[in-house]
Image (cartoon, helix red, strand yellow):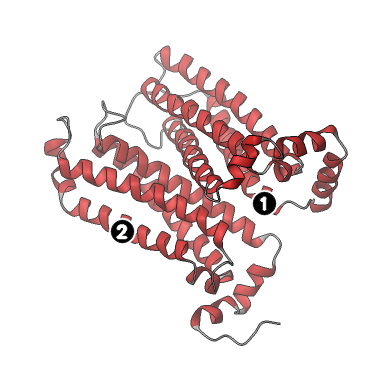
Amino acid sequence: MYPEPTNIWERIEYSSFGTTIAESTWMFPTFEVLHVIALLTVIGTIAVVDLRLIGVASKEHRVSLIAKDLLPWTWGAFGMAVITGSLLFISKAHSYMINPWFLAKMSLMVLAGLNMAYFHRTVWRTVGHWESDAPFPAAARVAGWTSLIFWVVIVFCARAIGFTLGIYY
Amino acid sequence: MGDLLFEMSQWLYTTPLNEFAQRVSESRLSGIILSWFWAIPLMQTVHILAIAGTLVSVLMLNLRVFGLAGHATLQETAQRYTRVLWWALVFVVITGVGMLFGDTVRNLLNSIFWIKMAVLVIGVVLALGYSQSLARQAAGGGQIASPSIKVAGIVLAALWCVLILAGRWIAYAPS
């Protein structure tokens, strides 16, 4: 028997959907595995583009072609990460919303998204002019470094959630 | 299935592995790792990033093999991503060993851990064969991968997903 919810997060957590996932022996681990596979695909594909932007890898390949190959996979995997992440969230909504590592992870994902959106609306528009020259414009390299750092810290926050869930009240 | 895994874990406790795991968990390195709360999360972060490297390498090789993406030649793609795959695997193993020292008993006496190790060995052997076949075919100028390479690519991707699944399920294994 669950207590009476006192806020929206508890209402989500104690909903029949939330408790079904939480009480199932296989649902949470299964969604977690799918979430990890999706997130690893997102990070891996983004890293390939970022490492090209900062001039560390794939130097002999055009960054626009690399991005064209990878972006559909990045977005597909991101969609799967959002769906599975939401299912995980529903089962422990209140615990997640009071966990600073979860809030940091979500904030960093928003910042990583804004960084990507800004990059695509500015420097990327002229990629055809600069992708044949090395090094790339400073703005492109900064966007690559920023994205890499954001995603590494996001993974750390994701792991920290697992180690700190339940210690915040 | 859960019962079988539980029995396997219980059997592991009756083997010399139990004493070995206890000894390792009392080692100096284990003590150092356990004395700092963030050591395991940090190692896990590098471990996960390295697994992302292996996963995206397998994905990129497969996309090129199946002609779904990849503007470079088969040879260029094979050279580029097999190098990433092996380097990432080195980091997977190093951080994996480090994490083993941080939680020896729970890992070594866990049936899913050994399933993961078996899948890892099979995956590495298959990756070796896959990359060599790919390099051989690409060196011969072939741009369309043979059916056997395509099958190996699919099996390898599936094995990597099983590896990730086993890695997460260690935490939920009945023991």
User: Horizontal and vertical percent for residue A156?
Assistant: 46, 50
B91, above or below A77, in the image: above
- In this view of the protein, which residue sits in the foreground, B123 or B43? B43
Q: Is residue B164 visible?
A: no
Q: Secondary structure at mark 1?
A: helix
The residue at the point 14 percent across, 39 percent down is: A137
In contact (CB < 8 Å): disc 2 and disc 1: no
| Alpha carbon separation for disc pair 2 and 1 | 31 Å
Q: Which residue is mark 2?
A: A111
Q: Looking at the figure, which quarter contains the C terminus of chain A?
A: bottom right
Q: Secondary structure at mark 2?
A: helix
Position of B17 with respect to A50 (left or right) is: right
Q: Residue type at mark 1?
A: Ala
- In this view of the protein, which residue sits in the foreground, A69 or A115? A115
Q: Which residue is mark 1?
A: B171
Q: Do the dots labelled 2 and 1 sit on one chain?
A: no
The residue at the point 40 percent across, 47 percent down is: A152
Mark 2 crowdedness (10 Å alpha carbons): few <14, some 14-19, many ≥20: some
Mark 1 crowdedness (10 Å alpha carbons): few <14, some 14-19, many ≥20: some
